[in-house]
Amino acid sequence: MAYIDDPETQRANIAFIKASMKEPLLERDHEFDLARRWREEGDERALHELVRSYTRLVVSTASKFRNYGLPIGDLVQEGNVGLMQAAARFEPEREVRFSTYAGWWIRSAIQDYILRNWSIVRTGTTAAQKSLFFNLRRLRAKISSSANGGMTDEGRMYVATQLKVDRREVEAMEMRLSGHDQSLNAPISETGEDDWQDFLADERPSPEAVVTGMRDASTRSKWLAEALAELSPRERTIIDQRRLSEEGATLEELGRELGVSKERVRQLEHRALMKLRDRLSHRVERTGDLLLEA
């Protein structure tokens, strides 16, 4: 749905558009001369003449995006920013008309503005999403007019092929464009007093569960420390490095460190685990809650 400006803004927009259309078109040689004067001499008059002559291109480009629900005046202003960026980077020696070069900058500036402001949810964060955002409506209309219906799986595959994106990206963008931003403070109905946010489920643990979990974790850590203290130094080393480390050491590594064989390390580990199980069995139902099982 297109945005409708207030009467005063509409008059200002019309005045700007009329002024843009009155600016004379530039001959190729004069255009290059203005660009060189601005680039090499910093001649601001040359810059102003060059930019004013192509504001009509900004207006033309902005009008193509008027149905994205944003003020046409804002689109024109963003296009003017792109036009200024083009003037700053234009290289006349490449023998390319300024209108050709500036068109890309103008369009890019307007599209970036639309992606930033079309929704409070960031849209078009990747090249594929940006391409879908600005082309899906056109391709969908083409498919619907020929098939007399909405998009089917075949239609989505057609769009994905045309734009060289994944079909799942097409489905996600189709859903995104079909919805609208809605405040969580908006009432569910005209007669009710409940807001949408009243029905959002909080899936986080309750404060009581958090406190209980912290207390239980502290108690279990104490139990485990007491059980580990009863092991021999070699057994404690093996358990620490094999069971209580994020990257457990191998039997071979511990064998080299302790000066014994891999089989002997395995035997010591087994004996240490049995001691821990016996020590913790009367405190917890599953010793695996405290210690990684083999």
Image (cartoon, rainbow, N blue to C red):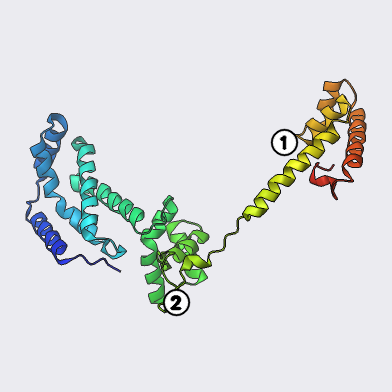
The residue closer to the viewer here, 32 or 276, is 276
Say few, some or many: other residues with alpha carbon within 10 Å of mark 1 (under 14 / 14 to 19 / 20 or more).
few
Q: Residue 190: x percent and y percent? A: 40, 77
Q: Is residue 245 above or below residue 22?
A: above
Front of the two marks 1 and 2? 2
Residue 239: x percent and y percent? Answer: 83, 33
Where residue 168 sits in the image (x, y, percent)?
52, 60
User: What residue type is disc 2 on?
Assistant: Gly
Q: Which residue is mark 2?
A: 192
Residue 2 in sight here? yes
Residue 137 is labelled as none
Q: Residues within 10 Å of mark 2 (few under 14, many from 20)?
A: few
Q: Quadrant of the C terminus?
A: top right
Q: Which residue occupies 79% across, 31% down?
A: 240
Q: Residue 96: tell me if it is visible.
A: no
First along the sequence among labels 1 and 2: 2
Q: Quadrant of residue 120?
A: bottom left
Label 2 element class: loop
Q: Secondary structure at mark 1?
A: loop
Residue on which the image places disc 1 = 246
Q: Residue at x 44, y 76 (%)?
A: 192
Q: CA distance from mark 1 to mark 2?
A: 53 Å
**Vertical order, 258 against 90 (above or below):** above
Quadrant of the rendering where the N terminus is positioned = bottom left
Q: Is residue 269 left or right of residue 156?
A: right
Residue 14 shown left or right of residue 163 in the figure: left
Q: Is residue 276 left or right of residue 213?
A: right
> Total of numbered circles in the picture?
2
Q: Residue at x 11, y 42 (%)?
A: 48
